[in-house]
Amino acid sequence: MEYKYIDIFAGCGGLSLGMYNSGWKGIFAIEKNSDAFETLNHNLMEEKNHFLWVEWLEKCNHDINEILISNKKELEELSGKIPLVVGGPPCQGFSMAGQRKKNDIRNKLVHSYIEFIKIIKPSCLFFENVHGFTVGFTNKKNEKTKPMSTYIVEELKKIGYNIHSEVLDISEYGVPQKRKRFILVGSLDLDPKDFFDVLKKKKESFLKEKKLPLKPSVKDAISDLQYANPKIKCLDSKGFLSGTYGKIESDYQTYMRYGLAENAQPDSHRFAKHKEKTIELFLEMQKMCEYGKRLSTKNTDLEGFKRRGITILIADKPCNTITSHPDDYLHYSEPRILTVRECARIQSFPDWYQFKGKYTTGGKLRKSDVPRYTQVGNAIPPLFAEQVGRALIIFMRNNKNGESII
């Protein structure tokens, strides 16, 4: 039996990959950015044939607001026929790790999400966003406004959904990263608290089945991807070097590299071209500064330090939240920032999953571009998403009448 769902604000496919691995089948996915959609398309459509798709929607990147207008009739024909809608709107405007701008235009996509749910009226929905989604902005009177999480709960209840939400730390689900996320589940017929009970109850047996540790460290995740390994010319970036694989040193690495050819090279493992002064600064930081603490011009007086902030990773601990900025973290033993592949490992993307588009961007383009680092940083960790997919199947089978709603 195939369990079907729609993924909106799909990004590069982290949530959809987890749904694929847990036995779901995608109907279609909506993602505005062309590079993120190309990554999703290559891995989950071309390689895995995961999405059924619909005849009326071209298989390419789409703006959800345009679909809500141009394809409203087709969406209305799906009303009440879809078991599940997953996904949450972009989080940058709410993120406590970013600049947190209440006027960020992407914040308004929450209203687009509500409108989509009103039309489709799925049996259940799964929504994810940053922890900052639960914190109100400060108005001109220095008062906290209503958190967006409260707004979305109120609106979904008006439509008829039973709602339960929690803030979960993804590091408790086998992902080597402290990543707090607002998780909301809605159902027309069931008590969503049951989903969270299943998710928490099953996590240890899930990881045991996968032969994975409950709380892997950064070193567990990336120690086979050292700069010290032999290097090759980067195939998709002229003038850059890419790393090669070293010896597998953990069960986590075995899982990440499963299915690769013996002579395979890591995808998106391009090293930054640091200046000599930058390398010297990094070495000095690794000698003098506290690991695991965010360093900035406010709390360090190192000569030449002009960065907005950087954290030296602790080898035997989980990483802090992976972001869209490549220079947020310094490697625990080498004087360099992380590669896209290392960030993807920490996010639990398997190594067969390839990322498309340019590696980085900057300036004003940060609001529109979604390069590889950003695709990874914005994603839901697939290992967590797979547990979500499994828990949703169990939850949706166990309705009050004893009959499956999927």
Image: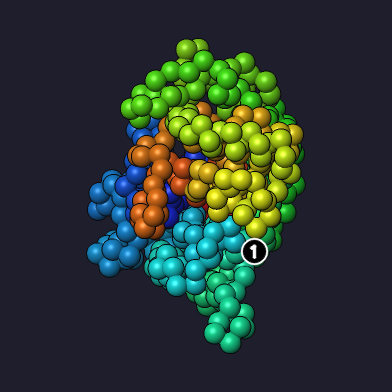
- Which residue is at 40% across, 39% downward? 359
Note whether residue 204 is visible. yes
Question: In the orientation shown, which residue stands out farthest toward the bottom?
Answer: 141
Camera-side residue of 277 and 251: 277
272 to the left or right of 211: left
Residue flagged by tag 1: what amino acid is it?
Answer: Ser
Expressed as whole percent of the image width and height from the top left, the position of residue 232 reads: 43, 18
Of helix, strand and loop, which one carries label 1?
A: strand
Q: Measuring from the top left, give residue 32's x and y in whole percent.
A: 34, 54
Number of other residues with Cα within 10 Å of mark 1, as a class: few under 14, some 14 to 19, many 20 or more: some
Residue 48, quarter of picture: top left
47 lies left or right of 327:
left
Disc 1 target residue: 165
Q: Is residue 24 visible?
A: no
Residue at (45, 45) in percent of width and height: 375
Q: Is residue 239 left or right of residue 249?
A: left
In depth, the one of 259 and 275 nearer the eye is 275
Front residue of 342/164: it is 342
How many marks do you count on the picture? 1
